[in-house]
Image (cartoon, helix red, strand yellow):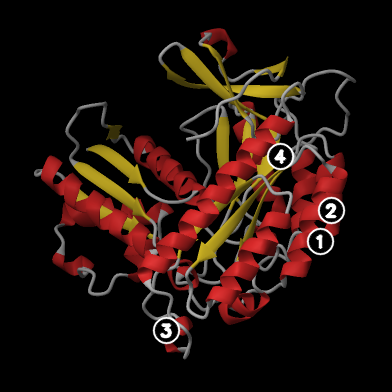
Amino acid sequence: MIFKILTLGCKLNFAESSALGKVLLSRGHQRAKAGEQADVIIVNTCTVTDTADHKDRQAIHRLKRENPNAKIFVTGCYAALLKGKKDKNELSEADQRILEEIDHLMPKDLETFHGAYSRDDRTRCFLKVQDGCNYFCTYCTIPFARGRSRNPYIKDIVAQAQQALNEGAKEIILTGVNIGDFGRSTGETFLELLKALDSLEPGNPDGCSSTGKPTEGALASWRCRISSCEPNLLSDDIIDFVAHSKHFAPHFHIPLQSGSNEVLRIMNRHYTRKLFAERVYRIKSLMPQAFIGVDCMVGVRGETDACFEDYVAFLATLPVSQLHVFTYSERANTRMLNMDLYVVPMKERERRSQVLHQMSEQKLRNFYNDHIGDQVTVLWESKKAGDRMFGFTENYIKLSAPYDKIKVNTFEVLTIHCYTIPS
């Protein structure tokens, strides 16, 4: 068959879609070329917010209109929460075979870990190291879609990472639902995983590691980024290790969700804003150049005007680089709906979102301006716009240069004279 895969949502979904595509190709199927009609379209969905659900539905309806003869299979988190799915016994034998191939990488089993990593872009590799979540925040449905926290053994992740490096990846991004919770299944720790990955070098035998240090002044052969990690799981030991590691970038993404302790309690978050601030200041004390992205939610039930003002004042004091702002939407089967709390009007939710978006734009511009004149290492990517190519520094500053095919997937040391704000 000729297939297409549409991926919506997070880096974890992209890793799983890429792995699914590889399985389908290995079984003799073909990926549709640009403009080519597909026999089968697989939509890997997200359900983190009501907006994500809406985008899922829009994408599915659009694909149906544009591909009237294609069979469309919906998988991922949104599909996991849907009720009334068609019984497999009602499907044709051919359709059942397709479902079996999809389930090979996108199973409905929420107890077993199924590994994945993206290989669609040889520059960056999204490596799945953990799945599921045990936190059950009062506003969130992800534990119902993804199941409980689980992970593979470190040795298996190391083998996958080594394979990606040997295939030409220059940057590995560790992904998962709650990656700081790594070790639930195996008794290992996230810090042990980071140390094992830091010893890898391209060209080593699969699963083997290098203990040699790079020559002084030499460019790193690859780098690694940690995706979102809960502040209560981002220990001082982890921060200290990243600061002195060979390959880990000074780049952190930390969910805050609210800067009000009262709202954090309502959300069932596992930290206070004091702990969050301590993590941020420790990062900055060891890595002043570090990029820190922060997840922020606005408009949840119980977020009074006073709580929001307290939230904004707290954020204003933090030396973070960018805010990723989400507007709260009511999610079926979440505990927050059963709590007797103040309900923020929708227009006020939108206003609060705008306040934080404006703060984010200013913080990002300030961060970029602070690094003009710095000598950095940029990894050039294959994507281009007109005659320009783009790449990111170790601390996630987006730079551009005249397109040069030879530079794609290579590191270059240069001085920042100007920058490109990510869209």
**x%, y% of residue 390?**
54, 22
CA separation, marks 3 and 4? 47 Å
- Which residue is identified by label 4? 207
Q: Earlier in the sequence, mark 4 or mark 2?
A: 4
* Other residues around mark 3 within 10 Å, as few (<14) / some (14–19) / many (≥20): some
- Quadrant for residue 375, please give it: top right
The amino acid on which the numbered mark 2 sits, given as a three-letter code, is Arg
**x%, y% of residue 226?**
67, 47
Secondary structure found at label 1:
helix
Residue 147 shows in this picture? yes
The amino acid on which the numbered mark 1 sits, given as a three-letter code, is Glu
CA separation, marks 2 and 3? 36 Å
- Which residue is identified by label 1? 278
Secondary structure found at label 3:
helix
The amino acid on which the numbered mark 4 sits, given as a three-letter code, is Gly
Q: Are marks 4 and 2 in contact (CB under 8 Å)?
A: no
CA separation, marks 3 and 1? 32 Å
Question: Would you place residue 303 above or below residue 232 in this image?
Answer: below
**x%, y% of residue 46?**
39, 57
Q: Residue at x 26, y 31 (%)?
A: 32
Which circle, 1 or 4, is nearer the viewer?
Answer: 1
CA separation, marks 1 and 4? 36 Å
Q: Are marks 2 and 3 in contact (CB under 8 Å)?
A: no
Q: Residue at x 65, y 69 (%)?
A: 310
Q: Residue at x 67, y 76 (%)?
A: 261
* Other residues around mark 2 within 10 Å, as few (<14) / some (14–19) / many (≥20): some
- Which residue is identified by label 3? 337
- Which residue is identified by label 2? 282
Q: Are marks 3 and 4 in contact (CB under 8 Å)?
A: no
